[in-house]
Amino acid sequence: MDPLSPLNLVLPLAILLSSLLAPPAIAMPSIEEQAGALIAWKATLQSWDRKAWPCHSWRGIGCGARQGKFVITKISLRGMRLRGSLEVLNFSALTMLTSVDLSHNKLTGRIPWSEVGNLAILEDLRLGINKLSSSISNSIGNLAKLSVLILWGNQLSGHIPNNLGNLTKLSLLDLCHNQLSGHIPQELGYLVNLKGLRLCDNMLSGSIPNNLENLTKLTVLSLYKNQLSGHIPQELGYLVNLKNLSLYSNNFTGSIPNCLGNLTKLTDLALFENQFSRHISQELGSIPNSLGNLNKLYSINLVSNQLSGFIPQELGNLVNLEFLEISLNNLSGELPSGLCAASRLQNFTADHNSLVGPLPTSLLNCKTLVRVRLERNQLEGDISELGLHPNLVYIDMSSNKLFGQLSPRWGHIPPEIGSMVSLFNLSLANNLLHGNIPEELGSLQNLEYLDLSLNNLSGPIQGSIENCLKLQSLRLGHNHLGGSIPIKLGMLTYLQELLDLSDNSFAGIIPSQLSGLNMLEALNLSHNTLNGSIPPSFKGMISLSSMDVSYNNLEGPVPHIKFLEEAPVEWFVHNKHLCGTVKALPPCNLIQKGGKGKKFRPILLGVAAAAGISVLFITALVTWQRRKMKSVEQSENGAGNTKVFSVWNFDGGDVCKQSFEATENFNGTHCIGMGGNGSVYRAQLPTGEIFAVKKIHMTEDDELIFKREEDALMSIRHRNIVKLFGYCSAVHVKFLVYEYMDRGSLSRYLENHNTAIELDWMRRINIVKDVDNALSYIHHDCFAPIVHRDITSNNILLDLEFRACISDFGIAKILDVEASNCTKLAGTKGYLAPELAYTTRVTEKCDVYSFGVLVFELFMGCHPGDFLLSLSMAKESTTLKDLLDARLPLPEAETTSEIFRVIMAAVQCLDPNPLHRPTMLHVTRMFSTAEVHGNRDHLHADIIIPVFYQ
């Protein structure tokens, strides 16, 4: 061919033109420059050695070939506890990066968006769970190849940039748990490949953009905990692949749109804590019938809205439904007839509505139910028809119109679950129930709260109720119960909150055995026909702070109990001849027996009254003078302004005095433990009673700790929470007086070889359940949820029976649902939830994580340290046999399976993502399910610790 032919001239020219017209190649620094940029940022990483080849031996670094050269393409340093700033990292030397994962660290400062925005081939950027601040720059819109952007769990502020809509390859966008504000940009509707959109827990306002209908691949839409308002757009009905829709805790109004019935793949619908209200039509209520089309739904939560009208019958068609929560609305009509027809429903709450009619047959026989709340409605029907519920933990049907007899079947223990009965709360108060209290209730051995008050129950209290040894509150008032008060009620030594037998027809004497209830705080025996005297042994009921015995036929002296001296006269009126040191009762020496005494009684009482007034006047004068002198002395020595609280049965001032004397002015010989904010002393009073006295250090922070512990423990009552008896607060000393736990802390028991052997496997299982019960109580059953924040083996105390109690509420936080619940870092290293490394927001899930660590410590016999982290990071597994404390023999088959179940629950508690951790209520359910079959193969089953958030 002629070298000057046209073809030979065109080809070089085409190559020249293509090179001139092609985009310039990305500048590619040498591998040494790239490595140098990383070393300059983090020289402290052990494997990052300048002399080593970064592509082969540097931890978290991945390489690839570009234009015939090795380049760094991947940085993965998730969960490495890195500190410092990203602004120091020279991203301009790392232009070939396709993936950056620096999540779960402690990075602070700004994200250098101008440099990050130049990473033209970046596909995956994960910076979640750090402390990064500033706003999201418009430079983010340059990352055209980005498919994953995770920035959740930082302190980012400002608006979401509109040009995020340029990132059309995005499949996951997660900006949750920041401080972003403004509206949701319409431009997000252009991200047609998006499968997950998470903007939750920010300060976003405005409405949901209509054009999100374009996101037809979306499976997760999480917009909860913002300030969004307006209606839910009908266009969301086009998101046919959606599985999770979470819009709760916003300000949405209007109706729940009928179009949600098109989302046939939906499994979880959370719309609670909004303002949904409007009816769809005159015939229909606020809940659309179309939700009955969603056969894959397992959870519906519509609590705390303004929903009205009927509950659609179609909800009974949802065969996979496990959680239905519609409490705190204005719903009316009857419950759907098909509820739990598929025997899947576990949690059903519809309390505080206006529901009427009978309980559906399918619900009456729903054996899967765990928690039921139907109180404060107008439900009717025969309670006797309620069937077997072996998994039931909590039931409250109080304040309805139910009638019938309590079914003996409730106490029946089906053979398939052996002796395991899990019900701990049974409330049927304020109904129309009649008949006897069934003997079989005594089989509910986990029962803690029983309320059958305000009914028409009759007959005696059955003899088996003393088997409910865990009862803390027993309310049987306002019925027609009769006979004598069973002496065996004195065996219910955990009764603490209340024993109420008022407004019945009990006769006979008050049994002295009731004085064995030394934890009881309130006793009401009023409006019966009791006779005889109040047992003198009642003076030993050291916790009692209320005792109403009015409207009986009692006579004789009232026991000398200090708190009764100032008791209201209403507690004693309308009895026969009560006397004693109680104010408003006559002294016993003025009560004359026989007719002659009666003749002069008015005169004697008049004289006594006049004398009493004189004595009171003189006493008041002397007391005033003494207090005046004492206040001068106190002002001189700085001991004034003492504030005392006590529920002991002697003068509150004696709290200080006797504690000083019993500890010899807090002598070190009586010290049984020391902590960061105080020391604990053993105090034995002259009466023989033993208490634990915690003396608080007198720093400004410890003042707050004292007040916080006082507030927390004054408001809670639980058998697995150490009991506060009183406190003393003076200028130079502050201390709290607690129940004494004989065996001390769990950590001490585990550290010592001899005592650790005493903690056999079943005792360790029971300790786990005790702690679980206490945490479930403070998280879910208190008026305001409480987060302990320091669940450790040091703060778990054991009594003689190895009952476990949570102690040390000095850094506890009472959650405010209206506030952010942010606070400074507090707790014990090794138990802290990982999210506390990047956020100050405290939730119950922090305690859940600590509980998981505690469970592993209990069964391993020592703190797991970095063992769990190393397993997680290496994505390796271990076996139960390798975990278990070698000081004990391997457990038998049945115990092995029970331990395995507990450990697997703890694994879920250790999930680094707090949203994936179970609640303590859910953990309780896990422990309350039917007993597992014994299987020693569980010793060799793989246990995999969850890896960090993907």
Image (cartoon, rainbow, N blue to C red):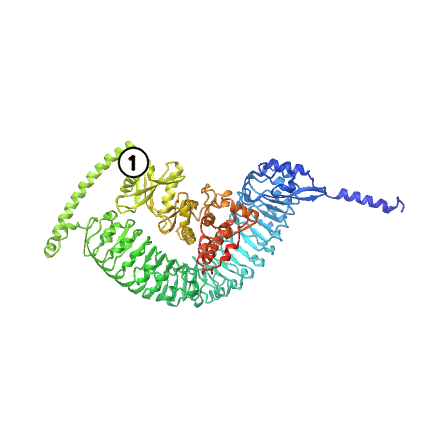
Identify residue type, mark 1.
Gly
Seen at 26% across and 60% down, the residue is: 485
Looking at this view, is 110 or 690 the one in front?
A: 690
Looking at this view, is 470 or 275 the one in front?
A: 470
Above/below status of 633 relative to 226: above
The crowding category of the residue bearing disc 1, from other C-alpha atoms within 10 Å (few below 14, some 14 to 19, many at least 20), is some
Seen at 52% across and 60% down, the residue is: 297
- 254 displayed left or right of 66: left
The answer to whether residue 884 shows anywhere in this view is yes
The answer to whether residue 407 shows anywhere in this view is no
**Residue 655: image x %, image y %?**
29, 42
Looking at this view, is 381 or 306 the one in front?
A: 381
Q: Secondary structure at mark 1?
A: loop
**Residue 937: image x %, image y %?**
51, 57
Total label count? 1
**Residue 744: image x %, image y %?**
37, 45
Badge 1 is on which residue?
Answer: 640
Above/below status of 514 relative to 154: below
Looking at this view, is 372 or 888 the one in front?
A: 888
**The quadrant where residue 393 appears:** bottom left
